[in-house]
Amino acid sequence: MDKNNYIGFICVGNELFYSVANTNVHIASRICELDGFEINFNIIVPDDMDKIISAVDFCMKNSDILIISGGLGPTFDDITREAISRYTGRKLVFSDDVWKEIQQRFKERKIVNIPEKNKKQAMVIDGTSVISNTIGTAPGMMIQHNNRLIFLLPGPPWEFEEMLRNSVMPMLRKSIYHAGGLFVRKGFNIAGEPEAVVEEKTDKIRDEVKNLGGEWTILAKPYLIELWLKIPSSKKKVFDRVEGALKEIFQDSFIGNYSIPEKLAGILEEKKMVCCFAESCTGGLAGHLMTEIPGISQRFNGSIVAYSNRVKRKILKVPRSILRKYGAVSEQTAVAMAKGARKYGKADVSLAITGIAGPTGGSIEKPVGLVCMAVALSNRHIETKSFYFSGSRSTIKIRAALAGIDFMRRVIIQNVA
């Protein structure tokens, strides 16, 4: 097997088996592929010396480059240094320079009394190149062993990403293993379409990509379908044809490589509009997704969480008569909520979401998963839509939040010049 440009990736930590999602593999794949490297293996191992060494041995036999994340902290279960020390037969030595950097990190946080345990993080493998950590206290390391490269990086995603992008990749670009960009990857997103429908409508494009030696991956997420394409770099102009075809097929459902909230933010900026939300069953989740976007305060005034009928009446001025006649989960109530949010939030356009997230509270007429929405461009121009979502309570909430944001986007596109 030609191993050049292939990377073995090991993520260390008991928590990855129980409570923490392994996002580092996604970070690593995205960053490495920009320079033509590919993650060949991703192995998750617990904080166990023998299992770490076994995973390292496997990757070293099947890749020329190994990246390990996690296990570089100061506590008893952080044993990645010790495992690599044992595997390579090199001693761990205390580094005064590394200890000074760690002390500096604590000073920046206004911490005077540095825990004695943090000295463990100043232990480095003999002969290693230390990789500075400008965010946390755990330094990284680069070791050459048996004509292969081993990189040790901390597990916290924000530290891992910064060090991989700004320290490790420049090293790899200068290494003998860098053969240039052999392929390029790009993603395209489709909002609100079923996975099977997207697959059926893209059969011909998928065949074209595969005939060119590329790869096509379809990934279903809440209210979103991601299409990931990998094309030989010599044929990257194919992306333009694919994008054009997807736009023609899916029209307003095609949102490029943006997330649903990012796409709404772009439309609001283009139209110079300010929005506001009123949320019941989503409990502020739609607003949270919008505030993840830097600079959104110019286009998003906020979200009013009106979970109870009392708050719907008092804050959003939903008439008691509407709540009695139609119920809290109805398009009529959503219209009243949207009107109230637009006025109270001083917005050009507003979104209201009200529904039954479950697992209880449903009926034959209004089952669990029913979510009613309204988008108000004015007190007279209000559009409504009802959705029926399946899944757990949290799944229904995230689908409803994204569907609501996308609903507002479509209403603006179709009605605002």
Image (tube, helix red, strand yellow):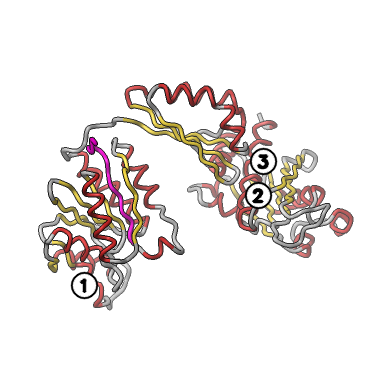
Quadrant where the C terminus is found in the figure: top right
Amino acid at the residue labelled 2? Ala
Assign a secondary structure to mark 2: helix
What residue appears at the point 89 percent right and 55 percent down from the top-left corner?
Answer: 325
Quadrant where the N terminus is found in the figure: top left
What is the count of numbered marks? Answer: 3
Q: Mark 1 points at which residue?
A: 119
Q: Distance between the residues labelled 1 and 3?
A: 53 Å
What residue appears at the point 17 percent right and 39 percent down from the top-left corner?
Answer: 174
- Is residue 99 in view from this perspective? yes
- First in sequence: mark 1 or mark 3? 1
Depth check, front residue: 283 or 34: 34
Q: In which quarter of the image is residue 196?
A: top right
- First in sequence: mark 2 or mark 3? 2
What residue appears at the point 44 percent right and 61 percent down from the top-left corner?
Answer: 20
408 lies above or below 124: above
Amino acid at the residue labelled 3? Phe
301 lies above or below 416: below
Q: Name the residue under label 2.
A: 400
Q: Distance between the residues labelled 2 and 3?
A: 10 Å
Q: What stretch is highlighted in magenta?
A: 1-12
Q: In which quarter of the image is residue 211?
A: top left
Counting from the top left corner in percent of width and height, residue 343 is at 73, 50
**Which disc number belongs to residue 407?**
3
Dot 1 crowding, Cα within 10 Å, few <14, some 14–19, many 20+:
some
Dot 3 crowding, Cα within 10 Å, few <14, some 14–19, many 20+:
many
